Image (spheres, helix red, strand yellow):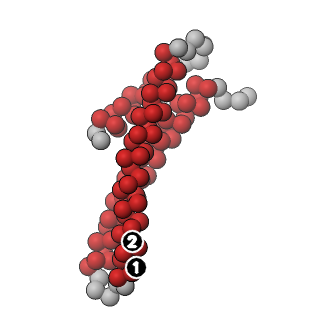
Amino acid sequence: MSPTQLEIKVKALQRLVKEEKYYLQELKDQKKHVDELKADSSVDKYDLKKQEEVLADTERLLPTLYVKIKEFQDNLEEYLNTYNGNEDTKEAKEAIETSKKLLSKH
Protein backbone atom coordinates (compact mmCIF):
# COMPACT_ATOMS: atom_id res chain seq x y z
CA MET A 1 0.00 0.00 0.00
CA SER A 2 1.31 3.42 -0.93
CA PRO A 3 2.03 5.94 1.79
CA THR A 4 -0.60 8.60 2.29
CA GLN A 5 -0.01 12.31 1.87
CA LEU A 6 -0.03 12.66 5.65
CA GLU A 7 2.64 9.98 6.06
CA ILE A 8 4.80 11.53 3.35
CA LYS A 9 4.63 14.99 4.92
CA VAL A 10 5.35 13.68 8.42
CA LYS A 11 8.31 11.56 7.31
CA ALA A 12 9.76 14.44 5.29
CA LEU A 13 9.67 16.76 8.30
CA GLN A 14 11.11 14.08 10.58
CA ARG A 15 13.92 13.43 8.10
CA LEU A 16 14.90 17.11 7.99
CA VAL A 17 14.94 17.35 11.78
CA LYS A 18 17.14 14.25 11.88
CA GLU A 19 19.47 15.68 9.23
CA GLU A 20 20.02 18.75 11.39
CA LYS A 21 21.55 16.54 14.09
CA TYR A 22 23.88 14.97 11.54
CA TYR A 23 24.97 18.36 10.17
CA LEU A 24 25.64 19.69 13.67
CA GLN A 25 27.79 16.65 14.41
CA GLU A 26 29.59 17.06 11.09
CA LEU A 27 30.20 20.72 11.92
CA LYS A 28 31.62 19.84 15.32
CA ASP A 29 33.86 17.13 13.86
CA GLN A 30 35.07 19.39 11.05
CA LYS A 31 35.89 22.22 13.47
CA LYS A 32 37.94 19.81 15.54
CA HIS A 33 39.72 18.55 12.42
CA VAL A 34 40.54 22.09 11.26
CA ASP A 35 41.83 23.00 14.72
CA GLU A 36 44.06 19.93 14.70
CA LEU A 37 45.39 20.85 11.26
CA LYS A 38 46.10 24.41 12.40
CA ALA A 39 48.06 23.09 15.38
CA ASP A 40 50.21 20.88 13.15
CA SER A 41 52.98 22.94 11.57
CA SER A 42 53.74 20.22 9.00
CA VAL A 43 50.30 20.45 7.36
CA ASP A 44 50.19 21.74 3.82
CA LYS A 45 48.47 25.15 3.67
CA TYR A 46 46.42 23.99 0.69
CA ASP A 47 45.04 21.04 2.69
CA LEU A 48 44.15 23.33 5.57
CA LYS A 49 42.45 25.78 3.23
CA LYS A 50 40.37 22.98 1.67
CA GLN A 51 39.28 21.73 5.09
CA GLU A 52 38.33 25.27 6.10
CA GLU A 53 36.21 25.46 2.93
CA VAL A 54 34.45 22.23 3.91
CA LEU A 55 33.76 23.75 7.33
CA ALA A 56 32.40 26.93 5.77
CA ASP A 57 30.16 24.92 3.44
CA THR A 58 28.64 23.08 6.37
CA GLU A 59 28.10 26.33 8.26
CA ARG A 60 26.36 27.87 5.23
CA LEU A 61 24.12 24.86 4.84
CA LEU A 62 22.50 25.07 8.28
CA PRO A 63 20.50 28.31 7.80
CA THR A 64 19.09 26.90 4.57
CA LEU A 65 18.15 23.70 6.38
CA TYR A 66 16.29 25.69 9.06
CA VAL A 67 14.31 27.50 6.37
CA LYS A 68 13.42 24.18 4.79
CA ILE A 69 12.35 22.71 8.14
CA LYS A 70 10.09 25.74 8.69
CA GLU A 71 8.57 25.33 5.22
CA PHE A 72 7.85 21.64 5.77
CA GLN A 73 6.48 22.37 9.24
CA ASP A 74 4.14 25.06 7.87
CA ASN A 75 3.07 22.76 5.05
CA LEU A 76 2.21 19.95 7.47
CA GLU A 77 0.34 22.31 9.80
CA GLU A 78 -1.67 23.67 6.88
CA TYR A 79 -2.42 20.14 5.71
CA LEU A 80 -3.60 19.13 9.21
CA ASN A 81 -5.88 22.17 9.42
CA THR A 82 -7.83 20.94 6.40
CA TYR A 83 -7.39 17.19 6.97
CA ASN A 84 -10.63 15.21 7.03
CA GLY A 85 -9.24 11.68 6.92
CA ASN A 86 -9.35 8.99 9.56
CA GLU A 87 -5.61 8.51 10.11
CA ASP A 88 -4.13 9.14 13.53
CA THR A 89 -2.50 12.59 13.47
CA LYS A 90 -0.55 12.13 16.71
CA GLU A 91 2.76 11.51 14.91
CA ALA A 92 2.21 14.59 12.74
CA LYS A 93 1.56 16.79 15.76
CA GLU A 94 4.65 15.41 17.50
CA ALA A 95 6.76 16.12 14.41
CA ILE A 96 5.49 19.70 14.35
CA GLU A 97 6.26 20.18 18.05
CA THR A 98 9.75 18.73 17.63
CA SER A 99 10.48 21.03 14.71
CA LYS A 100 9.14 24.05 16.60
CA LYS A 101 11.44 23.30 19.55
CA LEU A 102 14.40 22.90 17.20
CA LEU A 103 13.67 26.15 15.37
CA SER A 104 13.17 28.09 18.60
CA LYS A 105 16.82 27.37 19.42
CA HIS A 106 18.06 28.88 16.16
| CB under 8 Å between discs 1 and 2 | yes
CA separation in Å, label 1 and label 2:
6 Å
Secondary structure beneath disc 2? helix
Q: Which of these two is toward me, 19 or 88?
A: 19
Residue 102 vs residue 67, the one in the foreground: 67
Quadrant for the C terminus, please: top left
Percent from the top left, x then y, of residue 75? Answer: 49, 27
Name the residue rendered at 36%, 62% in the picture: 56
Badge number at residue 15? none
**Quadrant of the image for the N terminus?**
top right
Identity of the residue drawn at 38% across and 49% down: 62
Instruction: Give the residue drawn at x 35%, y 69%.
Output: 52
In the image, is 91 to the left or to the right of 21? right
Give the amino acid type for the residue marked by disc 1 in the picture: Asp
Q: Report the label total.
A: 2
The tag on residue 47 is 1
Residue 103 place in picture, x, y as percent? 34, 37
Q: Residue most toward the left?
A: 39
Residue type pointed to by label 2: Gln
Within the image, what quadrant is residue 104 found in? top left
Please name the residue shown 45% across and 33% down the image.
71
x, y percentage for residue 48?
36, 77
Q: Return the residue at label 2.
A: 51
Against 40, residue 3 (above or below) is above
